[in-house]
Amino acid sequence: MDAQVSKLLDFLRFASISTDGAYAGDVKQCAEWLARLLKEIGLETQLNATAGHPVVVAKNTHKPGRRTVLIYGHYDVQPVDPLGLWTHPPFEPHIEHEVIFARGATDNKGQIMAHILGVQEALSRGDLPVNLIFLIEGEEECGSTHLERFLSEHREQLRCDIIAVSDTGMVGRGIPTFTYGLRGIAAMEIKISGPAMDLHSGIYGGAVANPITMLARLLATLHDADGRVAVEGFYDGVAPIEEWEKEAWAKVPGGDAELIKLTGVPRLFGEAGYTAREQIWARPTAEINGIGGGYQGLGTKTVLPGEAFAKLTFRLVPDQQPAAVIEKVRKHLAQHVSQAVRMEIKSGHGGEPYLMNPNSPGGLAAQRALKKTFGRDVALIREGGSIPIVQSFKKVLEAETLLLGLALPDCRAHSPNENFPIENFRAGIRLNQALLQELSAF
Amino acid sequence: MDAQVSKLLDFLRFASISTDGAYAGDVKQCAEWLARLLKEIGLETQLNATAGHPVVVAKNTHKPGRRTVLIYGHYDVQPVDPLGLWTHPPFEPHIEHEVIFARGATDNKGQIMAHILGVQEALSRGDLPVNLIFLIEGEEECGSTHLERFLSEHREQLRCDIIAVSDTGMVGRGIPTFTYGLRGIAAMEIKISGPAMDLHSGIYGGAVANPITMLARLLATLHDADGRVAVEGFYDGVAPIEEWEKEAWAKVPGGDAELIKLTGVPRLFGEAGYTAREQIWARPTAEINGIGGGYQGLGTKTVLPGEAFAKLTFRLVPDQQPAAVIEKVRKHLAQHVSQAVRMEIKSGHGGEPYLMNPNSPGGLAAQRALKKTFGRDVALIREGGSIPIVQSFKKVLEAETLLLGLALPDCRAHSPNENFPIENFRAGIRLNQALLQELSAF
């Protein structure tokens, strides 16, 4: 096993689970180890305390006239439950058929370590061609709670021309993938209440509105029969999909049949007039993430429940704004809810959608680096998920973000048996160097 | 404290909770105590083992030419959770302002003990005027699981002209109440499944049907806008409410305002064209007793869940049949469910509605006994709940059941601080004797 793989395995041994306070010590030790590594390879490194987990910042010696590139990543990882489904302990990295299995292997330790080792190679050759800033946080898996404030407070220190992030996916093994758009998100919880307590459905049923029934009727108004969101004004400002995007996406391997196989659904379902890929990458949704009310145990309990709730998230696309969408949905719900029940709405977190021009100088530079690294044409995609910090970068640092992820569809990020092929790790090390070369003169 | 109240308190001290195996010993001891009591007052008594809890049967010496009356009741009680809400321990009976507080005080120990003590008084005077059978089971609170089989196996021994049950309600304190109808019930569980596992709502949302959304849309088809059940043929065979019933019910104290106050709902809601009482007593319902799916914890989890479920019960009225209703609902659901998800339906327990003619000879005898006992006009009502064993009596023993309950609206049966006024207990002892006198010659 070579020194580079060995370095990644050391990184993977830290149980740097940021969401659970019991692991705060592991998170801190991981940050300290990372800061030492960045210092050892020759970077000026700071371990910055925050109100949460530390942020590691490292820089080479900046020279006037050079492009400044910020590489963002995170050293924290997701929890490991259910532990019983792991074939090997999640923090004892295991290599099988040239694939590394461990929590964080893909998300994000493998990908950020590839950047670090790429920089180390360039530094050892004496040809790191840019002013570099590493920004590696420890709270990505718990919402990057303190990072936007950190950006604001260190705006001058973090000033850069462009940002690179490897935390998105590749559409298939060996296929270089450039992600130029992400959906935003807006969260909401609806509670419907009726009787002051659970009632006997025999003694009262028929004369009192059932909160579950009323919630179901309300949720049923969210979409029309064809799967389009039926909230008035919901699609206001939604940018149409460009012709070149449709063409680029049609070339991406994997289609409807693969999606059906992967998910196990009897058939696909979504807004009429769009392909599945278009629906996921470029159209907004209204999704019910959870629902609950009344008796959920075994058998029957003849209760007419006092209340019921649903948790919703809306995935947003340019140029929808989370607050405006929440307001439109509130209005829709108020218009459609029965007067025989009470409704309470809580809005949750929001994040704006992200879209950049892949044919901008930075985007073209990233694509050249990807093509050079993998030796084949680059897939140009958007993703359906949300990375809210990318909008914070744009807002606070006023810089675009290049998303050059190395996660494969079966990497099992957030799930048991997370994995990262050594092939992708090595590609990441080459990609970092190709990218910084391209960005030195973009 | 007199001997009769004292006897009831002894009965109430048994923790005869039938639903929880941990109390099987208490249930058995209670049955043995009850059998001894019935023997002591002069009845020929059997303690019958079943596959579940014992059934107590007791008879006087039957004489040819007399009417045979079966009095049914139960010595088992509901669980006591939440225990913290009881102001006194549930199995240490407590008297306050002439009201007995204990689990089972109303349901059903107080009411069946009143019958037993009424019979004791008649026997001690030497004028019990009928052939009497007491049938007192220990599984009413867990579905009378083994009783119908017991009836079939002891059909000859239990042959009777009429049955009396005190396990229903009085519409108000001091108002004699005769219940001549009960709703039936049919239970069903619906499971909607889509993806083989929970999916990330960002990565897949928009192209895959959400099982919660599809379940909500399906449940929303169960009623029309006015609260009428929209299943084709659901109301087939539903008997119209008779004019005399409407008149009788209009005289019963308590109305919409009281129902709103009691339940705390913002307004009543039910099938258009009927009063709340008519909706509850004589119209069928489709009620969702529970729903669940996806993430129900705190905050947000952006999951597109693999499945969602709902538990339903339909309350039925004459002449609806549970099996036929389930079939119609199955057909309705199959017609309305999206093809983008899978549906699984499990039907649960069923019980036919019950309706007898209150102006039959038995009904009139019961009303005369009630009027004599309470000294005022009898309220003629139906109830919205279900007592499936009454249909078993009709089917197996071929006898009508007279429902002369003594439960007050605030008796808190099944809830903490269950109670029974001593006034009702004494009325029950008198009612038993008046009833048996009336039934000796009906």
Image (tube, coloured by chain):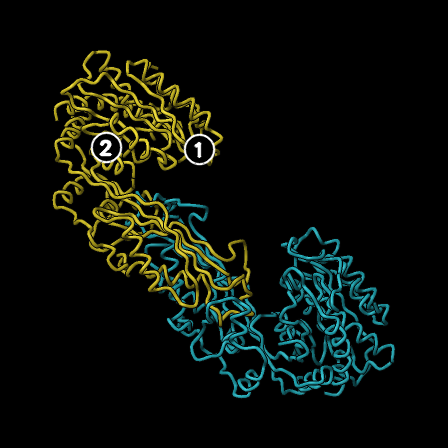
Chain colours: A yellow, B cyan
Please say if B124 is above or below A426: below
Can you identify the residue that label 2 sits on?
A397
Q: Disc 2 residue type?
A: Leu
Left/right of residue A105 with respect to residue B75 in the rendered view = left
Q: Point out the image quarter for the C terminus of chain A.
A: top left
The chain identifier of the residue carrying mark 2 reads A
Observer-nearest of A347 and B396: A347
| Image x and y of residue A278, in percent | 21, 47
Please say if B125 is above or below B100: below
What's the distance in space between the residues labelled 2 and 1, CA to CA? 33 Å
- Label 1 packing within 10 angstroms: few (<14), some (14-19), many (20+): many
N-terminal-most mark, 2 or 1: 1
Left/right of residue B327 with respect to residue A66 in the rendered view = right
Residue B160: which quarter of the image? bottom right
Can you identify the residue that label 1 sits on?
A80
| Image x and y of residue B298, in percent | 45, 46
Q: Residue at x 18, y 35 (%)?
A: A379
Q: Residue at x 67, y 74 (%)?
A: B405
Residue B121: which quarter of the image? bottom right
Residue furthest toward the top?
A: A125
Q: Disc 1 residue type?
A: Val
Q: Secondary structure at mark 1?
A: loop
Left/right of residue A154 with respect to residue B63 in the rendered view = left
Please say if B67 is above or below A30: below
Left/right of residue A39 with respect to residue B352 in the rendered view = left
Q: Residue at x 17, y 29 (%)?
A: A366
Residue B399 in view of the camera: no
| Image x and y of residue A158, in percent | 25, 27
Observer-nearest of A300 and A52: A52
| Image x and y of residue B411, in percent | 65, 67
